[in-house]
Amino acid sequence: MEKFTTLTGVAAPMPLVNIDTDMIIPKQYLKTIKRTGLGVHLFDEMRYTTEGEEEPGFVLNQPAYRDASILIAGDNFGCGSSREHAPWALLDFGIRCVVSTSFADIFYNNCFKNGILPVILPQDAVDHLMDDATKGSNARITVDLEAQTVTASDGRTFTFDIDPFKKHCLLNGLDDIGLTLEKVSAIDAYEAKAQTQFPWA
């Protein structure tokens, strides 16, 4: 998993509340177990017409936000079903950070396991960043995980809280497999000892 330290990029404003995981990645795209290739279907039903053409009014189809790496979202982002394809689709598009006033618990935890930083801030802070994001590609926002800050293009800085263990994992690029591999020497020692003590096992 790619480390997350400091991110400076374009932020796309999405002021909708209760964006659920089916809106993020519709159910018909859940057949794959690959983490790549889902970005093209991100927000599929809002992003494309029924004929498959791009909806020009949708934020990620606008030239200023095609390379957005940060999403400023409304309350309760990622609610609905627990599909891990939702953070896969966001990451495959290029979104590394989502800022909101709240997230659904399962989605929130899935983000950390896939290298995405979900940032929870008070409503006034999200409103400021949302307004900043409407300025387009010239307004770049900086997210500093080590300092636990989000800085708007006007220099205003907001501090966020994060679980120390989740922070450690993101800073070091550790998903569940990476955490296990950190203990590989202890695992090898245990297996060698077990083979000696229980050769019949």
Image (spheres, rainbow, N blue to C red):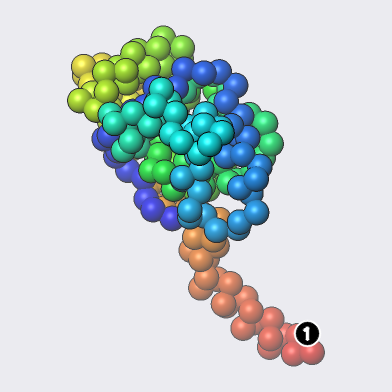
Q: Is residue 22 visible?
A: yes
Residue depicted at 46% across the width and 17% down the height: 15
Which of these two is toward me, 26 or 21?
26
| 86 vs 70: above or below | below
- Residue 197: give x, y in percent of width and height: 72, 85
Residue depicted at 74% across the width and 90% down the height: 199
- Residue 16: give x, y in percent of width and height: 52, 18
Residue depicted at 37% across the width and 50% down the height: 3
Q: Residue furthest right?
A: 200
Which of these two is toward me, 61 or 89?
61
* Location of mark 1 (residue): 201
| 30 vs 150: above or below | below
Amino acid residing under circle 1? Ala
- Residue 186: give x, y in percent of width and height: 55, 71
- Image quadrant containing the C terminus: bottom right
Report which quarter residue 18 is drawn in: top right
Q: Residues within 10 Å of mark 1 (few under 14, many from 20)?
A: few
**Looking at the image, how many numbered discs can be counted on the residues?**
1
Report which quarter residue 23 is drawn in: top right
| 192 vs 108: above or below | below
| 100 vs 83: above or below | above
